[in-house]
Image (spheres, grey):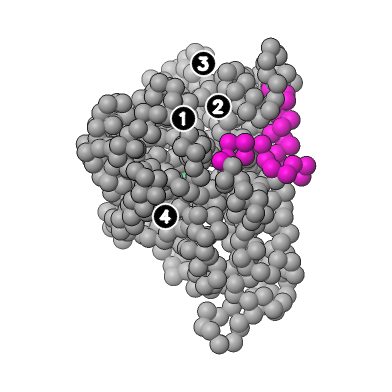
Amino acid sequence: KPPQELSIWEDAQKMIEKARRDGVETVWDRYEQQSPHCTFCELGLTCKNCNMGPCRISPKEGGKMQRGVCGADAHVIVARNFGRFVAGGAAGHSDHGRDLIEVLEAIVEGKAPGYQISDEAKLRRVSAELGINVDGRDVMDVARDLMDICYADFGSRKKEVGFTCRVPEKRKEIWRKLGIMPRGVDREIAEMMHRTHMGCDNDAPNTLLHAARTSLADGWAGSMIGTELSDIIFGTPAPSASRANLGVLKADHVNLLVHGHNPVVSEMVLAAAREPEMIAKAKAAGAAGINIGGLCCTGNELLMRQGIPMAGNHLMTELAIVTGAVDAMVVDYQCIMPSLVQTAACYHTKFITTADKAKFTGATHVSFHPDNAVKQARVVVEMAIEAYERRDQGRVEIPCEPVDITTGFSIEALLSALGGTLDPVLDAVKAGKIRGFTAIVGCNNPRIKHDSANVGLAKALIKKDILVLATGCVTTAAGKAGLLMPEGASMAGPGLQEVCGALGIPPVLHMGSCVDNSRVIQLCAAIANALGVDISDLPVWGASPEWYSEKAVAIGLYCVASGIPVQIGTPPHITGSDVVTNLALSGLEDLVGAAFLVEADPEKAADIMDERIKAKRKALGL
Ligand code: BF8
């Protein structure tokens, strides 16, 4: 396919062309090789959970193969597969959250040189919320108690995870009645694996309810702990200016890209790159300096807190290397295409892994732990400088100029911009200037023209005076489209334009990484609490038009289970079961007050979302 059909962006199109010239395979090539995909698998009708199989169920009713060898029917198999998919996503976010607890533990024990408590006020505020006595106590004593409470949220000893203290009482009652109150992160994930073992939970709706519980443990515990501890350790984001697209790479600098998710690694690499000694080494190697750029979610983490520019999102990661200007890419875990090892090998790029739980054959492994991170970060930066010396400037092509963006809209930053209370925003909602909110989150997927739906939906919604919040890979998409700048409000409807003008904010607010979708649910809960209603009463949506990952499904499900309906561009592998599909698209509405909408067309999706927002506003008397 011509590059213009694969991505909406000039930088992507140019680099796809260059990859073809350079003989480098990309995700789009492999997608084509894999197409058409297996129909059984697409429908969710294959089961590999035991060694009597693998089995597949015929989608034709009445045909042969209506049950697996064990007797499981299509509904049970689809629900089991979906449950494990959600468990995978919840595990990813939550294990990331646990890594932050381990860093906090190392700080408390004095074994984490380079890490510190950067936001003591937030440490005390969050700890107090969780019932810890903070008055007059030493910061490290409070931190130790917070660490203990967070660890306990992963276990089996709680009836309700700690941050459910933020959830409106009405919502908690729904969860208790349905038996989906999250008790412990590891517990719900392990129970999901147990239930989907052969011969356990053989009732599809029952399995799906536990999938919801598992996702809630992610959103209200694993991810929320990840966000809150990241803020405490690295600082709570505040609005700042930055830039995005492949133009953030600099031909005359050592370019070091951080990719993955956890700021535990990327923050330390950034700190090392800023050391005068490292800059001197880069200059001695002939470079003008060291340029750190972000990819994917750890890029979001550095962007939110440090204003570090964003080189690209998920489908840009290979293309960044294709510029020939990336000297090193350092990664931790999640969403890192295994292909990057081969892409890097086509150039001079050093590909460096850092997490012992995410090694890549062929990569250089520099093992990061809280006690050695400062030292290892220097090793990484030195490797980038060495690679710069091998760079062939004749192969370098930086395809465009960067665009300006603004970032850093944590809840704390929003509140402080609004004078300490949500009232100005609520007033704008009541006056109809802001008609509702949508968090557009998640990924890219080669099934969909890169960023076409992410940008298309954001533009369609702001035109309807719906304020958009962006996280994850949607951030870069929105930024490249000019939607993260106050001037982007010119693309919004008149009401939103007025509010953005008055507050000096963009029509799309960057709230962080995918783990930071916890900020979105926290904000929804805070608005619901302020209005004395349930989250499902609010004129809000979640959306993930180009999602691809298990984590995105976990996010979608915890939003729905929290009362926030979610639009997705493509369905997960559940359509082989009408029981499961109907539950996802409508049945959940009766149970939790929200459901999924599958609509690939951004304009159509925006219209449907708008109708619901109208209905919710009316029910609230607005
Ligand atoms: O957690 S948005 S492609 S990078 S899964 Fe991955 Fe999707 Fe990007 Fe971050 Ni989230």
User: At x 56% / y 87%, what residue is drawn?
Assistant: 63
Tell me where residue 379 appears, x and y as whole percent. 59, 26
The reply to whether dot 2 and dot 1 touch (C-beta < 8 Å) is: yes
The label nearer to you, 2 versus 4, is: 4
User: At x 40% / y 39%, what residue is drawn?
Assistant: 469
Q: Secondary structure at mark 4?
A: strand
Q: Label 2 crowding class (10 Å Cα cut-off): few <14, some 14-19, many 20+?
A: many
Q: Amino acid at mark 4?
A: Gln
Image mark for residue 231:
2
Mark 2 or mark 4: whose residue is earlier in sequence: 2
Mark 2 or mark 1: whose residue is earlier in sequence: 2
Residue that numbered label 1 is attached to:
410
User: At x 59% / y 42%, what residue is drawn?
Assistant: 169
- Above-or-below relation of 596 to 357: below
Mark 4 or mark 1: whose residue is earlier in sequence: 1
Tell me where residue 41 appears, x and y as whole percent. 54, 69
Q: Quarter of the image containing the C terminus?
A: top left
Image mark for residue 242:
none
Mark 2 or mark 3: whose residue is earlier in sequence: 2
For marks 3 and 4, give the CA distance.
Answer: 45 Å
For marks 2 and 4, give the CA distance.
Answer: 29 Å
Residue that numbered label 3 is attached to:
275
Q: Nearer the viewer, residue 59 or 424?
A: 424
For marks 4 and 1, give the CA distance.
Answer: 23 Å
Residue that numbered label 4 is attached to:
567
- Above-or-below relation of 420 to 465: above
For marks 3 and 1, give the CA distance.
Answer: 28 Å
User: At x 74% / y 37%, what residue is drawn?
Assistant: 152
The reply to whether dot 2 and dot 3 touch (C-beta < 8 Å) is: no
Tell me where residue 403 appears, x and y as whole percent. 29, 33
* Magenta stretch bounds: 143-168
